[in-house]
Amino acid sequence: MTRTVRFRTPSARIWAALAGGCLVAATAGCSGDSGGAENGGSHDDSGSQQHSHRVSHSGALQPPEAAQGAVTYDPAAAAAGAQLSVSAQESGGATAVELTATGLSPDRGYAVHAHTDPCGATGDAAGPHFQHRVDPAATPQQSSTDPAYANPDNEIWLELRTDPTGAGQASTTVPFVFSERAPASVVLHEEPTTAAAPGEAGSAGGRVACLTVPFE
């Protein structure tokens, strides 16, 4: 089972408009209800430049045949039942991404990246790493290997390290926000960190688990 929570913080202009509406309607009473998504409305991403946009999503890992957006491909490295939670907060032209985990293997590292597609029956279903500026030389068969594109400022890299109980937390902030494109999943890799020597693209090994995350 997975769960998604989305938040939008209205801009100062919107708060001012709401306050004005309350004053005009003061003699008749004002409920303070803005008619937003919490009351059955929908989000309008066209105003994203005036909003702080937050997404929070979580899921418990299950084998591919039983999974609903949270998948383990290697139960020895990422056991069924392990819980993953991802949040993303856009503000001021940057995006802060945080991952928390419980129930993973104790005292080990996982290189974690945001990927372009949702999780599927195999690790490959999540597609390549999400890139803010897409490497024009990359193809569906050959992921980006150019460090000008495959780097932690143009992709989303998280270095997760678990404690003796299998719990851990990792976070990063990237200098961009999601506009017409956004990642669709977060993948845990078998290597403990994303190996990247100066001037080289990072590599992280096989895919051991995946959480579908609707970043948009």
Image (cartoon, grey):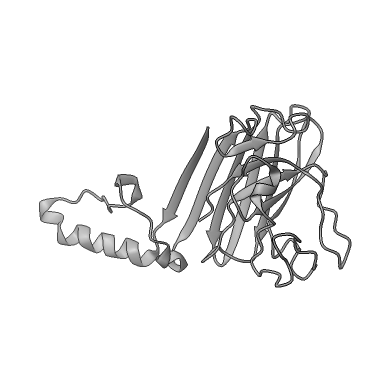
Residue 142, picture quadrant = bottom right
Q: Position of residue 186 (x, y in %)?
A: 65, 47
Q: How many marks?
A: 0
Q: Residue furthest left?
A: 27
Q: In the depicted view, which residue is nearer to us: 182 or 22?
A: 182
Residue ID at (73%, 33%): 78
Name above or below for residue 103 compared with residue 116.
Answer: above
Residue 163: percent from left, percent from top:
77, 32
- Residue 145 lies in quadrant: bottom right
Residue 100 in view of the camera: yes
5 to 107, vertically: above or below: below
Q: Is residue 195 left or right of residue 54?
A: right
- Left/right placement of residue 132 relative to residue 53 reads right
- Spot occupied by residue 155 in the image (x, y as percentages of width and height): 69, 61
Q: Position of residue 173 (x, y in %)?
A: 65, 58
Q: Is residue 170 visible?
A: no
